């Protein structure tokens, strides 16, 4: 009789265990479904944010005047140096400042960084835009090459 009672208890425990496993599987599946739905919603929000940021950027202006080629030639810059300055410094700086100010920047890479006092307003614009970095975000990678 004691054996029979133990067998009955064992059967009830097995049934309870099966029910708990089935319930856990249902809950895990529901959580996975929720995760997939949230990931999908997150991707849609990122795309929407990107579209909104690009709309805002259409009307954004770089805050520093870029001097014409003649200005740099008069300072002794050669044609190749001016091209490098325009492509690798001014364009990269404009892109970095715009992305920082619009909250869509995760890295900054500048490949032309010779010292020239006339470039200081551009550096100042970049450093002022650092105030726009989300203090709770992942930060911004900064690379000078």
Image (cartoon, helix red, strand yellow):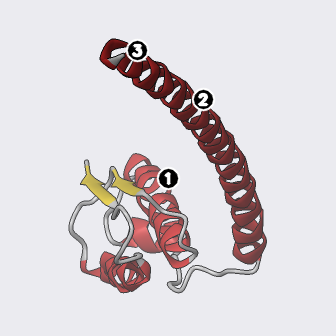
Q: Tell me the residue at 55%/72% (across/down).
A: 98
Residue 122 location, quadrant: bottom left
Eye-nearest disc, 2 or 3? 3
Q: Tell me the residue at 46%/20% (across/down).
A: 8
Q: Which of pointers 1 and 2 lies earlier in the amino acid sequence?
A: 2
Q: Between 56 and 93, which is closer to the camera in this rendering?
A: 56
Helix or strand or loop: what does disc 1 sit on?
Answer: helix
- Inter-mark Cα distance, 3 to 1: 86 Å
- Inter-mark Cα distance, 1 to 2: 62 Å
Residue 33 location, quadrant: top right
Quick check: 50 above or below 80?
below
Residue 97 image point, x, y percent: 48, 73
Q: What is the crowding at mark 2: few (fewer than 14 residues within 10 Å), some, or many (at least 20)?
A: few
Q: Between 89 and 125, which is closer to the camera in this rendering?
A: 125
Q: Tell me the residue at 41%/69% (across/down).
A: 72
- Inter-mark Cα distance, 2 to 3: 27 Å
Q: Which residue is mark 2?
A: 22
Q: What is the crowding at mark 1: few (fewer than 14 residues within 10 Å), some, or many (at least 20)?
A: some
Q: Which residue is mark 3?
A: 4
Quick check: 98 above or below 124?
above
Eye-nearest disc, 1 or 2? 2
Q: Which of pointers 2 and 3 lies earlier in the amino acid sequence?
A: 3
Quick check: 115 above or below 145?
below
Q: Which of pointers 3 and 1 lies earlier in the amino acid sequence?
A: 3
Q: Which residue is mark 1?
A: 87
């Amino acid at each position: 009789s004691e054996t029979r009672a133990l067998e009955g208890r064992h059967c009830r425990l097995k049934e309870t265990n099966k029910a708990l496993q089935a319930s856990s599987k249902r809950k895990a599946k529901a959580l996975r479904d929720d995760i997939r739905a949230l990931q999908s919603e997150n991707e849609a929000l990122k795309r929407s944010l990107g579209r909104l940021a690009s709309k805002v950027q259409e009307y954004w202006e770089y805050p520093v005047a870029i001097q014409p080629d003649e200005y740099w030639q008069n300072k002794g810059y050669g044609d190749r140096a001016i091209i490098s300055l325009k492509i690798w410094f001014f364009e990269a700086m404009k892109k970095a400042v715009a992305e920082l100010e619009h909250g869509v920047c995760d890295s900054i890479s500048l490949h032309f960084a010779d010292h020239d006092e006339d470039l200081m307003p551009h550096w100042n614009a970049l450093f002022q835009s650092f105030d726009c970095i989300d203090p709770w975000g992942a930060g911004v990678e900064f690379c000078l090459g």
